[in-house]
Image (cartoon, rainbow, N blue to C red):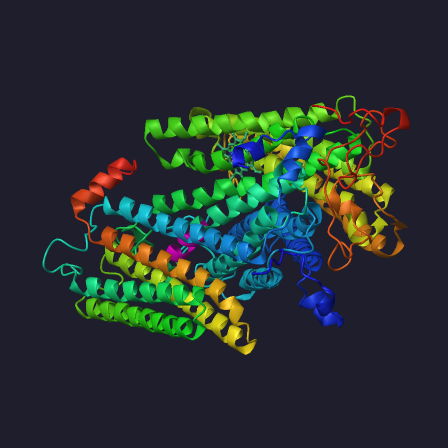
Amino acid sequence: MNLIARLTERSWDPATSAAAAASATGPEDVFAGRQTMLHIFLVIVSVIFMLFFLTFIAHSQYPGFETLTGEPWKPLASTTQLWINTGVLVLASLMMHLGLTRARQGQMGQAIGFTLVAAFFSLQFMLAQLWLWRDLHSMGHTLVSNPSHSYFYLMTGVHALHLAGGLVIMLGALVLIWRRAAIERLERSLKLCSTYWHYLLGLWLVLFVLLTRSPETYRTIAILCGLG
Amino acid sequence: MTHVPIADQPMDDHHPTSFVAKYVWSQDHKVIAIQYAVIAIFVGVVALILSAFMRLQLGFPDTFSFINPNTYLQYMTMHGMIMVVYMLTALLLGGFGNYLIPLMVGARDMAFPYLNMLSVWFYFVSVIILLASFFVTGGPTGAGWTLYPPQTILPGTPGNEWGIILMILSLAVFIVAFTMGGLNYVTTIMQARTHGMTLMRMPLTIWGIFIASWMGLLAFPALLVSAIMMAMDLLLGTSFFMPTLVSLGNAVDHSGGSPLLFQHLFWFFGHPEVYIVALPAFGMVSDVLATHARKNIFGYRMMVWAIVIIGALSFLVWAHHMYVSGMNLPFGFFFATTTLIIAVPTALKVYNWTLTLWQGNIRLTPPMLFAIGFIFTFIHGGLTGLFLGNVIVDVPLADTMFVVAHFHMVMGVSTVMVIFAAIYHWYPLITGRMMHEGMARVHFWTTFLGSYAVFLPMHYLGFMGVPRRYFAMGDTAFMPESTHALNASITVFALILIAFQAVFILNLIWTLRHGREAGKNPWGATSLEWQTPDVPPKHGNWGDKLPVVHRWAYDYSVPNSTQDFIPQTVPQGEMLEKSAAGQTEGKSS
Ligand code: HEM
Ligand SMILES: [Cu+2]
């Protein structure tokens, strides 16, 4: 039954209410619960980043705000490093996906193998991001040199933290599955993990696009959002 | 794959036996609820004592040497923050949410019991961090519960060394705790409801908690984001919120930040937050009113929709807290309009509560007294909200005692009235004993009349221009002598009001041992939590089989039925007088 129908049920009326109850399922599966929790969690993360983005756009309209690209001496003037890091994260996501498909086909050994490779690439991504930070820092683009730089470090940092948290939970789950010899749980765990990884990839792409725009684009977004 | 229903796992293999497993590291939602409630009531009492200190200074300036301008601001800040976040939010969602959700929707426990346990322990840690700030150099922050930068960070504000750091840290930990709890509440309500429990058969308590949890999950991130950015400004020298400015003769190291940005973030959390505590209260009071008036709640479906609409609209009104921060005209117009629109579903709820009482078989039990008291105080506070929602009226009243009166009536007193109603109502279920009636009545009348004696005069003080958050008025010519007399009288009543809360605490403790046995379902209520095989409910709640729901939660005084309530577990057509058994039962509303 769709949501509108469920919210308009005349529950005080015995006849219609009984009909509605007949189509209600009772408690759902444990896995469905975990999946719901993950989805809500991703909504929360989206809200957090949405607020980062909005304040970033608002900030971009203040005097003294420098965009990160545009001139050769700007921190993200060359996006080569960003593209490389993106590639690594895409690989991580892809491996995650392959792991899941293998698990679905019942090839558990391969599934675990791909998952570990995904973990490796994720770690690689975080190291590469750290590398980028170090480079920028040594070029004088520090956390405090401009609000835009603060945003850059803040948002990439929080993004990496989410990846790190995901890694810890994923490896923890693998260990649990191994210790309890509960291989049948692998597919479900991997399903949740790959959702999370694809989400973080998407988030990174949005971040990438947002951070490398020109002042005019920020101006336009700001006006559209009523922040101009 | 096998279907393992949420919260219906067999419990026998992990019945905790030792005291520690049962009451300390417990994963039972009922124990966790009580842990939440005990901590919340404890910090609530701390905050109450702080308010007594503030009142002493306001009523009798320069009489008490331990209150100076700095400590006054610190008491004020801690009072506000504790009451709103650590007491009300934690007690309503962590306490009542945890206890009632699984019982009212017919689950054995929360969807994620382990996460639930983590939640309460994170909450505990956040409270410890918060209270620790009383013992560090410089004491707790005195920036006001709104924590506006730049003054929060700058020298001259008490607690700008350690107090503010601990405050931010504590809030962050609290948000993590809340999120773990909130994910549980929402998932449990959406997916662990028992057979036959459709959305529209849920009691309004669950609807209030459900929407409030959603709002918390979506609003607390704004506080988290502002806390993170503020911490970076404070500790790492960034300039998210800190503008270029000269402080105590020295230029600060910051430049380019915007204090207004913080205000927007804060109130994007702050306004929904007031409804995060209001909606569970709305829900619980509806159920208390229906049960003790022996009538179905008037307009159930409208009540549900109103809760949902209020929840959604609350995200669109935040800037009404910022009228005096400066904003352009269309902006102010927009927020004034949304603010007044939100009053429509709110008023609708008030009408429906009142109409529920109409021709009811009202029993003036202690929970009912508090519930009716709530209707009064809420109407009162809601009306002053309409004043403040208009930009032009708000400008002179902002930052005066009028605002203090508004939010205390609407959020402080009203919500606390419902909390008391709820405790008197559900205590027999939680402990198996009835609270002492006489003490409860004394508690009600002192609390109800006391609150009016304290907060009604504050409206007048506000009209006269008495500012809020001021340590002392000094020699202000426009303030007549009578304001001082009024202030002194408020203080006296406040102290009486606070003292009489001891009756309540005593009652809680006394009843635990000496209260009359409640037996099963002493109020004759229909909802599921009263239909458990044991009172108080045991671990796993339902014995070996989950209950099956056959009707909505408000079948009170159904015509032709054999008793004046029909529990949700009774199949349609049962419990009717013989002569009527053939006809359809139930009534419309
Ligand atoms: C009819 C509905 C309401 C309207 C129109 C309304 C309007 C307002 C406005 C305009 C202000 C800002 C006043 C100022 O700072 O100058 C305000 C403050 C406040 N309101 Fe309401 N309000 C309503 C209901 C509520 C409810 C239901 C609650 C809580 C349960 C609440 C809690 C608060 C609090 C805590 C503040 C003060 C925050 C602070 O400045 O520290 N209000 N209200
Ligand atoms: Cu508000």
User: Start and end of the magenta stretch?
Assistant: B223-230
Position of residue A170 measured from the top left corner of the image (x, y, whole percent):
45, 68
When asked about the image quadrant of residue B370, the answer is: top right
Residue for point 43% across, 71% down: A107
Q: Is residue B584 left or right of residue B35?
A: right
Q: Quadrant of the N terminus of chain B?
A: bottom right
Vertical comparison of B98 with B282: above or below: below
- Looking at the rendered structure, the number of numbered marks drawn on it comes to 0
* Residue B162 magenta: no
Q: Can residue B500 be spotted in the picture?
A: no
Q: Nearer the viewer, residue B248 or A33?
A: A33
Vertical comparison of A118 with B49: above or below: below
Position of residue B364 measured from the top left corner of the image (x, y, whole percent):
82, 32
Q: Nearer the viewer, residue A108 or B463?
A: A108
Q: Is residue A201 left or right of residue B384?
A: left
Secondary structure of the magenta portion, mostly? helix
Q: Quadrant of the C terminus of chain B?
A: top right
Position of residue B319 measured from the top left corner of the image (x, y, whole percent):
42, 36
When asked about the image quadrant of residue B37, the answer is: bottom right
Residue extending furthest top?
B359
Position of residue B383 measured from the top left corner of the image (x, y, whole percent):
58, 26
Q: Is residue B478 left or right of residue A200?
A: right
Residue extending furthest left?
A72
Residue for point 70% across, 62% down: B10
Q: Can residue B242 be spotted in the picture?
A: yes
Q: Nearer the viewer, residue B579 or A140?
A: B579
